[in-house]
Image (tube, rainbow, N blue to C red):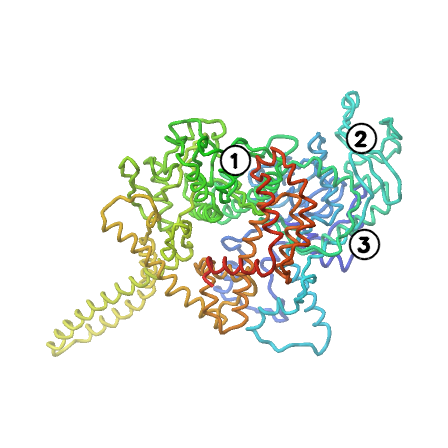
Amino acid sequence: MAGKSNKSKAKRAAQTSAPNSTVTSLQSDAPPAAPTPAPDNDAVEAAVPETNEVPTQVDESESQEASNDAQPKQGELRLYSVPVKTLSGGKMELQLNPGDSVMDIRQFLLDAPETCYYTCYELLLRGKDGETHHLEDYNEISEVADITIGGCSLEMIPALYDDRSIRAHVHRARDLLSLSTLHSSLSTTLALKYDAAAANKAQIPGTDKPNVPELDCLGFMQDVPASLDKLIISPSEEIKCVESIVFSSFNPPPSHRRLVGDLLYLDVVTLEGNKYCITGTTKAFYVNSSSGNILDPKPSKSGFETATLIGLLQKLSSKFKKAFREVMEKKASAHPFENVQSLLPPHSWLRPFPVPDHKRDAARAEEALTISYGSELIGMQRDWNEELQSCREFPHSTPQERILRDRALYKVSSDFVDAALNGAIGVISRCIPPINPTDPECLHMYVHNNIFFSFAVDADIEQLSKKRPSNDLSVVEKESSSEKLPCKDKTCHGELNAELNSCNEAPLIESEQATYASANNDLKGTKLYQEADVPGLYNLAMAIIDYRGHRVVAQSVLPGILQGDKSDALLYGSVDNGKKICWNEDFHAKVLEAARLLHIKEHAVVDASENVFKLAAPVECKGIVGSDNRHYLLDLMRVTPRDANYTGPESRFCVLRPELITSFCQAEALEKSKCNTKTNEGTDIVSDVSADTSKNGDESINGEENGASEEKTVTEKQNTTADSAAGSSEISKLCDEITFNPNVFTDFKLGGTQEEISSDEENVKKVSSYLVDVVLPKFIEDLCTLEVSPMDGQTLTEALHSHGVNVRYIGRIANGVKHLPHLWDLCLNEITVRSAKHILKNILRDIEDHDIGAAVSHFLNCFFGNVAAGKASTNNLHAKNQKKDQSITKKSQGRGKGKASAKKTLLSYMMVDSDMLWSEIQEFAKAKYEV
């Protein structure tokens, strides 16, 4: 965000020089100490080191440069100091930009320690001329007043609580009293430990190390211990502020108390052991006189009515005030990465042993019993698609507009991922019912919190054949891994409801369309089209969640598809694997514009009726116009062409990475440019020879002609820069002209002549050969020369992807670095972990809930230890669960786990020993990674 509080700027200085100032600022009823005045922004931007000598004369050019330096450069944000009067009567200053919205200001105030516990208020902006403006949440400051002229100020005025806002206030108060909101990943924790160790070593004399710049990047992992328990992220030590804050059993308020403004009642137990019943009204919080089982709404103490719950607790308990100050200081000293909302929240599989005691927590119990899996309990659910598309339609012609647009997109994306994560947990935990409960479990689809959920796993043919007789099986073809909701408009999908003749065909189709690879490719294709940012062409919000062996695809709901609106008709692509292809000129123009940016060739395809269509996207993509009249493109699993090095039927979704396509196009364009340059040079040589011949025929050259030739030489030198720029433009143009047909090496029937098809196939073979013959050897060479220095599996994967190499080639990388033990071990570890993860996912996906703990522990014992084959432990566990397996109900059979399959699964993972597990890992690694 652009703005920030002055106090947060000088956070470290304030903690060291004036530690007592925080005490005053955290008191809600006493005015906080005035923050230190911020230096003038102009002075900060134009500040230069002071010198003892003052020059008497300033060159005009230097003065001009100084004035240019004082002006903000393009893309930089200019901040202006705006004073804010808080609800407690204190004053603070915010550094704001005219482009900041009111929501940004609210977030700044929510992060500032002086105002972090105020949630219900309105903002007034007073201009220099004395005019007062009431700020709406979605306004920008520049739309209301001009803060660049100075003299503007903000004032927080109290607003009335309602049922939703007062519950949000209580939830915010609970979050402020806990340190559990500070989440740091393992890399952040290790970095902080390394910084602390480096600081301690710097204080000890004689510990200086020689300055070797090449080894600076290796110091990050230098002091990391090898023991596994040392890598456990230790949870933050909680600072207890209050014994409990729970909703009272007096809730909901009786009707006669609702008429006077009572909204809720809270039961609070302080650290001193005192019990209070607090009334929350539309205006304030106060302690009532209730005792026992009778509600007495009269205030028990006069003068103890405050606008915030934190302010009331500070008055009631001195221990609360002290502990709350410590919590705020702890959060203020935390690393920024621990406070900023993460798009992908960190999750650790490691926990300390022995397991800590589980203590009573009434607030935690309330949240667990009222869990909504990411949806709003009160109020309308968020329309994720509308929020995302509205943010994408923000203007982005200037750097300031692009910053605001990207910030809004990041916020919406982070919230969507968080809601999708909670919803996926509810789906896998069977807390959210499917919209098609009569279909097999692997085909179930869910809609929750305006998010569409579907599974992306291989269908189990054996289980499907057990659940449905072959003569009664009638499965509807789905729309791949994207919007699989049935469309009621028959003209939309044509023969979407065609029956399959064999019971095995449906699982095979679903296996192809709903694999892990297809979901991953769909996500990458969606990213590419979003980065292309073609006006008028939209994509849905999408996230992939892996949980308990399942891969769940979460997408925003396509407008109109739940209502069966005719406006969501399919206009582009196919829903039945190319049997019937739809085409629309307007839609094709938008897709063609994106195809030029993504190096996709416009090509001809033929459907089952021998109709020829010109497409600029994969055949199985789906172009749909939603009820909001936006053009949506879905199912982008093959935006890049198929890898010609993997042509087997099981490698249908082995596609090339977009980084490789970009690298290849640049290399080809550069080669063509060199060839063109050599051709032009050859022509120039012929011209020079003829010119020399005519020159030798002349016996005299006058001085004017010599002067003219010298002037011509100077002009040619001046045009060198222009020629280089033209060369770059030529390379860029040649690069854009290189395109690929994404539908070659597939089962779809291509149109055009045989020469065109052969040429398209040859282009794809050429880029696949470029990967094996050029990119892989260069990457191995960079590893050997330390040009690329991966430190762990994650950085190795990122390095492979940035060079356009798929992880399936990691086996070839490992074979190329066998002579370097550290790289060989790193590649083998990554292959082993990925193979073991695949096996563990299969185990977790097939077992019952009560067997998860035993299955995971047995797997890890076999993986890290040496478990010999034996039947003692297996028989014991089998005896305990034999009755459960024999009494599996019809409900569990509906989940695809009957009696026989449950027994088979139990024996399958408990009879495995270390030798069997490692043999399976080696077999999988050899098949997938060619090791």
User: Which element carries disc 1, helix, strand or loop?
Assistant: helix
Task: Kindly indicate the quadrant of the structure image that contains residue 533.
Answer: top left
Under mark 2, the amino acid is: Ser
The label number, if any, that marks residue 20 in the structure image: 3
Under mark 3, the amino acid is: Asn
- Lower position in the chain sequence, tag 1 or tag 2: 2
Task: Kindly indicate the quadrant of the structure image that contains residue 372.
Answer: top right
> Is the residue under label 2 in contact with that under label 1 (CB below 8 Å)?
no
Under mark 1, the amino acid is: Lys
The residue carrying pointer 1 sits among few (fewer than 14), some (14 to 19) or many (20 or more) residues within 10 Å by Cα, namely: some
Give how far apart the Cα atoms at labels 1 and 2 are: 47 Å
- Lower position in the chain sequence, tag 3 or tag 1: 3
Horizontal and vertical percent position of residue 234:
71, 57
Q: Is residue 146 visible?
A: no
- 3 is higher (above) or lower (below) than 789: above
- Lower position in the chain sequence, tag 2 or tag 3: 3
Nearer the camera: disc 3 or disc 1: 1
In the foreground, 88 or 764: 764
The label number, if any, that marks residue 467 in the structure image: 1
User: Which element carries disc 2, helix, strand or loop?
Assistant: loop
The label number, if any, that marks residue 807 in the structure image: none
As drawn, is 343 to the left or to the right of 732? Answer: right
Q: Residue at x 29, y 56 (%)?
A: 762
Q: Name the residue carrying label 2.
A: 249
In the foreground, 493 or 338: 493
Give how far apart the Cα atoms at labels 3 and 1 are: 70 Å
Q: Residue at x 44, y 66 (%)?
A: 779
Give how far apart the Cα atoms at labels 2 and 3 are: 39 Å
The residue carrying pointer 3 sits among few (fewer than 14), some (14 to 19) or many (20 or more) residues within 10 Å by Cα, namely: few
In the foreground, 642 or 307: 642
In the foreground, 500 or 606: 500
